[in-house]
Image: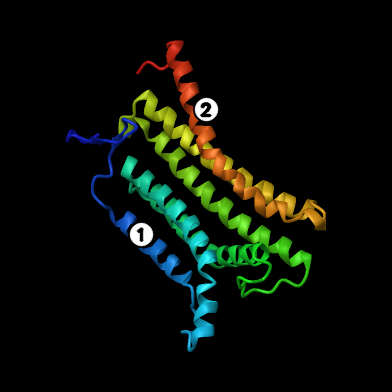
Amino acid sequence: MDSERVALGKDGHPRRGRHMTRLETFTDAAFAFAAAMLAISIDTVPQNTLELVDAIKGAPAFIASFAILLLFWRAHQSWSERYGLEDMPSVLLTAGLIVVLMIYVYPLKIMFGAAFYAISDGWLPSGFQLTEISEFRLLLTIYGAGFGLMSLVVSALYLYAARQKDRLGMSSHELFDTHAESLSWLIVTGVAGLSIMLAWLLPVASVELAAWLYCSLIFVDPVLRRVQNHVWKRRQAIGFASD
């Protein structure tokens, strides 16, 4: 590791990405472009009040879609800040994340547009017509594939960082947390895979549950954090975590 003093984060682990790298700059630009593609009105500028109101009605879907993009952007930013890696495997994994992101943008907006259309009983516009249940199943599959692949890439980034433990000079606690972070994103990937399975296995009357399954992720992170802290304390208690 660099002999220069490294700042510590709130978790007590080093923050090695002290300076923005070309990889991080490129990633930020890609996410910014993806966010721009989610703009409330892409095709035309409203020409009257009614069109303006219709455009603004798309705001909830835009905000929800933007929040998902922000989730993955923050995940990569945190990884880059913690480990500061910019070698070939890091570049390739990040490139994979960006490729999936660009493909994922439109299914993301379509999915949330359909969700808010259903919740509002048609008052909020969707802009995408689904005429058969098989089309909805396909949409869930495409959305889940994008969400799952992006989560899998983030998991792989943390797993790769863990394999660089000697190069990065990780403590046993940081290595444990890095593996835990990789596992948590792998679990998120599993949720996406389960949603795809349910999309094709559930009967017509219940197929919407495959979409609502993603709401369970709200509880995944806090639960995993509690389990992670509990396991680490247990390991310390039995003297297994000595550096």
Disc 1 packing (10 Å; few <14; some 14–19; many ≥20): some
Rendering quarter of residue 4: top left
Element carrying mark 1: helix
Q: Position of residue 241 (x, y in %)?
A: 41, 17
Look at the image and tell me in which quarter the C terminus lies.
top left
- What's the residue type where badge 1 is placed? Asp
Look at the image and tell me in which quarter the N terminus lies.
top left
Who's the residue at 33% across and 54% down the image? 24
Who's the residue at 64% across and 67% down the image? 117
- What's the residue type where badge 2 is placed? Val
Indicate which disc, 2 or 1, sits on the residue closer to the N terminus: 1
Q: Which mark is residue 227?
A: 2
Q: Which residue is mark 1?
A: 28
Q: Nearer the viewer, residue 80 or 10?
A: 10
Rendering quarter of residue 132: bottom right
Who's the residue at 61% across and 64% down the image? 116
Q: Position of residue 185 (x, y in %)?
A: 52, 42
- Front disc: 2 or 1: 2
Q: Nearer the viewer, residue 242 or 106?
A: 106
Q: Is residue 210 above or below residue 173?
A: below
Separation of marks 2 and 1 at Cα, in angstroms: 32 Å
Q: Which mark is residue 74?
A: none
Q: Nearer the viewer, residue 208 or 83?
A: 208
Who's the residue at 28% across and 53% down the image? 21
Q: Position of residue 82 (x, y in %)?
A: 33, 40
